[in-house]
Amino acid sequence: MSQVTFSIPDEILLALKATPEILAARIRIAAAVKLYEMGQLSSGAASQLAGVPKPYFLSHLADYGVNTFDLSEEELSHDLKSA
């Protein structure tokens, strides 16, 4: 497994009232959500990056304003007719 490290100014930690560990977890999930939203990661890969189970990841996408399922109107209509 690879490791990525970077520096965070102490002022950022103070402003966010976070420890380095808590901020690292928040950054991981935020990055995973954005990469999922951009279509660069599947939900499974994004949940793995975030370090959380896939159901947890999917259930918290709305917290970041991201749709769980990105269906076009045509796809949604087809799914409704097939149900």
Image (cartoon, grey):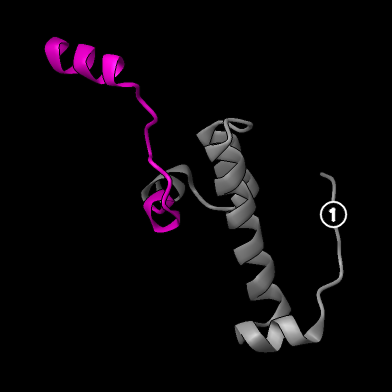
Give the residue displayed 49% in from the left and 48% down from the top.
53
Q: Is residue 61 magenta?
A: yes
Range shown magenta: 60-83
Q: Quadrant of residue 76?
A: top left
Image quarter in which the C terminus is found: top left
Of 58 and 54, the residue lying toward us? 58
**Residue 41 versus residue 56 in the image, above or below:** above
Q: Quadrant of residue 10?
A: bottom right
Give the residue displayed 54% in from the left and 35% down from the top.
44
Give the residue displayed 68% in from the left and 89% down from the top.
14
Query: Does residue 5 appear to the left or right of 59 in the view shown?
Result: right
Q: Measured from the top left, where is residue 55 in percent x and y? A: 40, 45
Of 22 and 75, the residue lying toward us? 75
Query: How many numbered marks does the figure carry?
Result: 1
Which residue type carries mark 1?
Val
Q: Measured from the top left, where is residue 42 in percent x and y? A: 56, 31
Q: Residue furthest front?
A: 73
Of 32 and 45, the residue lying toward us? 32
Give the residue displayed 84% in from the left and 52% down from the top.
3
Q: Is residue 2 magenta?
A: no
Identify the residue under disc 1: 4
**Residue 50 versus residue 12 in the image, above or below:** above
Crowd tier of the residue under label 1, counting other residues whose Cα lies within 10 Å: few below 14, some 14–19, many 20 or above: few
Q: Measured from the top left, where is residue 59 in percent x and y? A: 36, 49
Q: Secondary structure at mark 1?
A: loop
**Residue 27 versus residue 22 in the image, above or below:** above
Image quarter in which the N terminus is found: top right
